[in-house]
Image: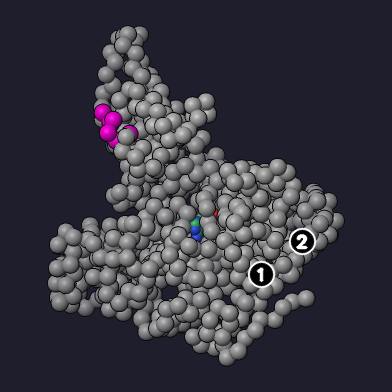
């Protein structure tokens, strides 16, 4: 039986709501989290009954069953690769109900890749409502912790990416591009707690320079109104700071003269920004004073002094940016509000002002049906785990799990690839710490490079030096975020045989050839990496650091001195531990950067 939330005067176990509208949303959260298991049962039954006639459920002979037992007994746990043939048919124009009984409205292109291309996630129109519902819960929760957000604005750096069409003419684009372009976002009703400094026209421009320029300019013009500064991920906010470092002179000039630089050619942006822009030499002088010092510490609070917190995700791969953000913001709190993916939006952080190391997300049971593959302490699957998935309400505190979802759009028992640890419960809803993405070695922003992709890239690039009788005997990697944008650093130990090669080349490899190896590696990396390099400029040129012979043996000695077993030692393909990085860096004999941009086009190769 459903448990009713106890609510008196707009106060829930979450705290007293800021206003009646918030109270309703908080009651909703309480209702969902008190009845987690019942809601999950209802969601599964809804999904299975509406999709009963789909080819997929028929294939597994569900015969209209909507209960958990039959569902778990008959449907396999799958990965993207298992579904790809079905997804490809939909992309090619097959309109029959393959995965979902509702028409597929578009494809969401995940930042996770398969065979080098973004995964294509079919979605249905009503999912936008579900995403909107989750977004609508964020402000009422934030208002519990930060009063007065209706007295100012949010400076959010939000961007869309270019989109393509599937052979059947459906759009294929990232989930946020889909959301920002939707009427849900564009025609959102005025909410004093959610006013942005960025005009929609700036957010909706695919040219990342023009979009960023306009958003920064509007943020500067309204600097005293700004109460929070944010982006989706930490990497996006750091790009904005870098942009300010590179463009403050032009921005100040525009503000001083009250005219918009000719570099902004998008007519919609020009019109939206010009309305706000008037000559303000005093503001221009202020920006010049703050930015010309060459000291960027606390730049966020210097320019936007009323900022109460940063609204950015710094969990998972983004944790690497925390120290840099602390430096630029003078230690402002960082609120990680939401956990979501292209496949499904999962949940929210009910204590958004907690420290990044304590962030836990409460998966909201109405968003989809959630199951969990139990993992052993070493992160591997428990015996029989594939067959014994645990339901949302029954996960155990302290344990780690891999997330498996069933969605209204037609994914059934789909492995997302995220590893989560249960930290506690809010009512009956578990709260999860994001631990990591499975198989991801390197990530700067939304790119995810796994071990196999890195291996392929090294193999491809090392072909170029073969004619010098040289081979890459060992390698490892590191996502360097010391400078923004961050970039991949690949450490290479080379073996160069002294005897002359057939074509008479001796053993010294020209430096330009090693530079070319960097580009060759980039060419081989997946489309998200290349898009970030080419279109978004959010990843810098790949760097190869050649280390002197014997370095990787020293690395092994170091690991063994710290207790590694000599029999089981494997070269780590990615290193983050500072003493190891120091050791590697102290052995570098030459460094090389990619001399150009890899090839990338918005069109998919499959
Ligand atoms: P995409 O499908 O490209 O939207 O990427 C979704 C993935 O981003 C998720 O499956 C997670 O791996 C990661 N992600 C999303 N939200 C968070 C978060 N709050 N903290 C850490 N990682 C996240």
Magenta-drawn stretch contains 586: yes
Tell me where residue 366 appears, x and y as whole percent. 66, 69
Tell me where residue 20 appears, x and y as whole percent. 54, 88
Whether residue 43 appears in this view of the structure is no
Q: Residue at x 80, y 51 (%)?
A: 73
Against 436, residue 431 (above or below) is: below
Magenta-drawn stretch contains 249: no
Can you tell me whether the CB of the residue at mark 1 lies under 8 Å from the nearest atom of ligand 1? no
Q: As rendered, which of 351 and 269 lies closer to the eye?
A: 351
Quarter of the image where one finds residue 43: bottom right
Q: Residues within 10 Å of mark 2 (few under 14, many from 20)?
A: many
Quarter of the image where one finds residue 170: bottom right
- Pair 2/1: label in front: 1
Whether residue 396 appears in this view of the structure is yes
Quarter of the image where one finds residue 123: bottom right
Answer left or right for 413 relative to 583: right
Q: Residue at x 14, y 62 (%)?
A: 293
Q: Which residue is mark 1?
A: 428
Tell me where residue 308 appears, x and y as whole percent. 35, 74
Magenta residues, start to end: 584-589
Q: Residues within 10 Å of mark 1 (few under 14, many from 20)?
A: some
Q: Earlier in the sequence, mark 2 or mark 1?
A: 2
Answer left or right for 255 relative to 480: left
Q: Residue at x 31, y 28 (%)?
A: 547
Tell me where residue 334 appears, x and y as whole percent. 40, 66
Against 510, residue 75 (above or below) is: below
Against 163, residue 498 (above or below) is: above
List the single residue furthest toward the right.
Answer: 63
Q: Which residue is mark 2?
A: 48
Query: Which quarter of the image is occupied by the C terminus?
Result: top right
Between the residue at mark 2 and the residue at mark 1, the CA separation in whole angstroms equals 24 Å
């Amino acid at each position: 039986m459903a448990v009713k939330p106890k609510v008196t005067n707009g106060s829930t176990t979450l705290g007293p709501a800021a206003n009646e509208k918030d109270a309703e949303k908080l009651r909703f959260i309480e209702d969902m989290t008190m009845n987690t298991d019942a809601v999950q049962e209802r969601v599964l039954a809804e999904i299975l009954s509406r999709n009963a006639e789909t080819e997929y459920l028929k294939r597994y002979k569900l015969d209209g069953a909507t209960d958990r037992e039959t569902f778990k007994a008959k449907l396999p746990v799958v990965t993207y690769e298992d579904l790809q043939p079905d997804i490809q048919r939909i992309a090619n124009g097959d309109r029959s109900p393959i995965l979902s009984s509702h028409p597929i409205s578009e494809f969401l292109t995940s930042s996770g890749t398969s065979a080098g291309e973004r995964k294509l996630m079919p979605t249905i129109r009503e999912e936008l409502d579900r995403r909107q519902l989750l977004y609508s819960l964020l402000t009422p929760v934030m208002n519990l912790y930060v009063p007065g957000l209706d007295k100012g604005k949010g400076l959010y750096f939000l961007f869309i990416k270019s989109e393509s069409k599937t052979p059947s003419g459906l759009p294929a684009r990232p989930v946020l591009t889909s959301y920002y372009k939707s009427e849900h976002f564009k025609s959102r009703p005025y909410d004093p707690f959610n006013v942005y400094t960025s005009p929609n026209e700036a957010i909706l421009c695919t040219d990342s320079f023009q979009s960023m320029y306009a958003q920064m300019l509007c943020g500067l013009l309204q600097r005293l109104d700004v109460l929070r500064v944010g982006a989706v991920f930490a990497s996006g906010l750091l790009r904005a700071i870098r942009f300010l470092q590179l463009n403050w002179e032009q921005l100040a000039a525009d503000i001083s003269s009250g005219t918009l630089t000719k570099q902004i050619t998008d007519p919609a942006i020009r019109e939206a920004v010009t309305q706000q822009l008037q000559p303000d030499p005093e503001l221009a002088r202020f920006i010049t004073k703050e930015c010309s010092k060459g000291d960027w510490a606390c730049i966020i609070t210097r320019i936007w002094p009323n900022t109460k917190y940063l609204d950015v995700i710094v969990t998972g791969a983004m944790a690497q940016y925390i120290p840099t953000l602390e430096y630029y913001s003078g230690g402002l709190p960082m609120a990680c509000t939401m956990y979501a993916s292209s496949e499904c939006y999962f949940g929210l952080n009910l204590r958004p002002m907690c420290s990044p190391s304590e962030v836990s997300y409460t998966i909201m049971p109405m968003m989809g049906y959630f199951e969990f593959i139990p993992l052993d302490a070493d992160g591997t699957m428990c015996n029989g785990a594939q067959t014994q998935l645990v339901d949302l309400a029954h996960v155990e505190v302290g344990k780690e799990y891999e997330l498996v979802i069933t969605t209204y759009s037609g994914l059934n028992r789909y492995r997302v690839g995220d590893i989560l640890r249960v930290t506690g419960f809010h009512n009956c809803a578990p709260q999860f710490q994001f631990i990591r993405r499975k198989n991801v070695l390197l990530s700067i922003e939304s790119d995810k490079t796994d071990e196999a992709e890195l291996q392929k890239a090294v193999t491809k690039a090392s072909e170029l030096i073969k004619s010098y009788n040289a081979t890459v005997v060992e390698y490892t990697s590191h996502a360097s975020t010391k400078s923004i944008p961050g970039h991949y650093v690949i450490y290479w130990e080379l073996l160069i045989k002294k005897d002359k090669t057939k074509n008479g080349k001796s053993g010294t490899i020209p430096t330009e050839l090693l530079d070319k190896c960097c580009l060759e590696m980039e060419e081989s990396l997946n489309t998200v990496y290349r898009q970030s390099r080419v279109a978004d400029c959010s990843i810098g040129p790949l760097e190869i650091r050649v280390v002197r012979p014997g370095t990787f043996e020293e690395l092994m000695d170091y690991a063994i001195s710290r207790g590694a077993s000599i029999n089981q030692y494997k070269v780590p393909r990615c290193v983050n531990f500072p003493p190891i990085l120091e050791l590697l860096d102290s052995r570098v004999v030459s460094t090389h950067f990619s001399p150009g941009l890899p090839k990338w086009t918005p069109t998919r190769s499959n």
